[in-house]
Image (tube, coloured by chain):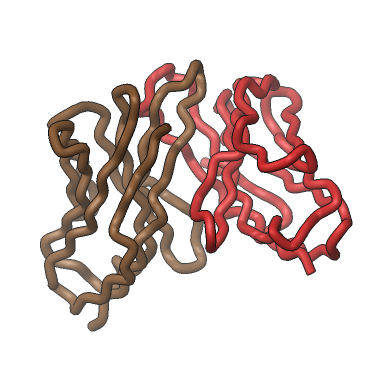
Chain colours: A red, B brown
Amino acid sequence: GAGVSQSPSNKVTEKGKDVELRCDPISGHTALYWYRQSLGQGLEFLIYFQGNSAPDKSGLPSDRFSAERTGGSVSTLTIQRTQQEDSAVYLCASSLNSGTSGTVQYFGPGTRLTVT
Amino acid sequence: GDSVTQMEGPVTLSEEAFLTINCTYTATGYPSLFWYVQYPGEGLQLLLKATKADDKGSNKGFEATYRKETTSFHLEKGSVQVSDSAVYFCALSDRAGSNYKLTFGKGTLLTVNP
């Protein structure tokens, strides 16, 4: 079946511009996560959605970062006024809401963002 | 807060060698533990998991045992192949409300030479 998809796969933008990154989770997965993978910081949690609600936004690094999810499916991560330190691979993952910590998260291929 | 520490490598082995990648964790609750793998040019995928103490996760010849007394989840494989070359991430998931976010180690690059 279809896995998690993300678009675009690569994005190069100029410092100060806004960018939108999209995630299509596996159908039926109610939980959705955004992570960031960078050389200096490794893999970091950004935000968690349960349905269309985001009960945990604690990993967003600044108020330039926001995310939404509509229809319990597609999610968009928006970065406003991009900075060079935002350059990273942004990963999306989805999972069933089984109510246990052993639930497996399935990852998309990521969006590589480069801010010049 | 939760944290995961794993040997950073890089690790270079010859084919058929024994592999160990050490992983230890700190958590406030009773986490589940995972190993994810990232092959060159591909996304993160689950390799194996264990959800409680003394559980052993296994897949593709890899094994890891959840050791609560030593807070460890070391990855082992008896005989590595060139196709095992990848970056390996140890991770834990602990409950924070309904959020089961993953906390990752820094990753270990494994290169297996023929």
Residue B81 or residue B5, whichever sits in front: B5
Q: On the picture, is A15 further left or further right than A42?
A: right
- Nearest to the observer: residue B58 or residue A68: A68
Residue A66 seen in this snapshot: yes
Above or below, A72 relative to B68: above
In this rendering, position of residue B13 left or right of residue A98: left
Q: Position of residue A95 (x, y in %)?
A: 50, 31
Extreme-right residue of the structure: A17
Q: Position of residue A30 (x, y in %)?
A: 58, 23
Q: Residue furthest front?
A: B1
Q: Which quarter of the rendering shows the C terminus of chain A?
A: bottom right
In depth, the one of B90 and B28 nearer the eye is B28
Numbered marks: total: 0
Q: Is residue A2 visible?
A: no
Q: Indicate the position of residue B95 as horizontal and vertical percent values.
A: 42, 22
Q: Tell me which corner region of the image, top left, top right, bottom left or bottom right, holds residue B102.
A: top left
Q: Position of residue B28 (x, y in %)?
A: 34, 25
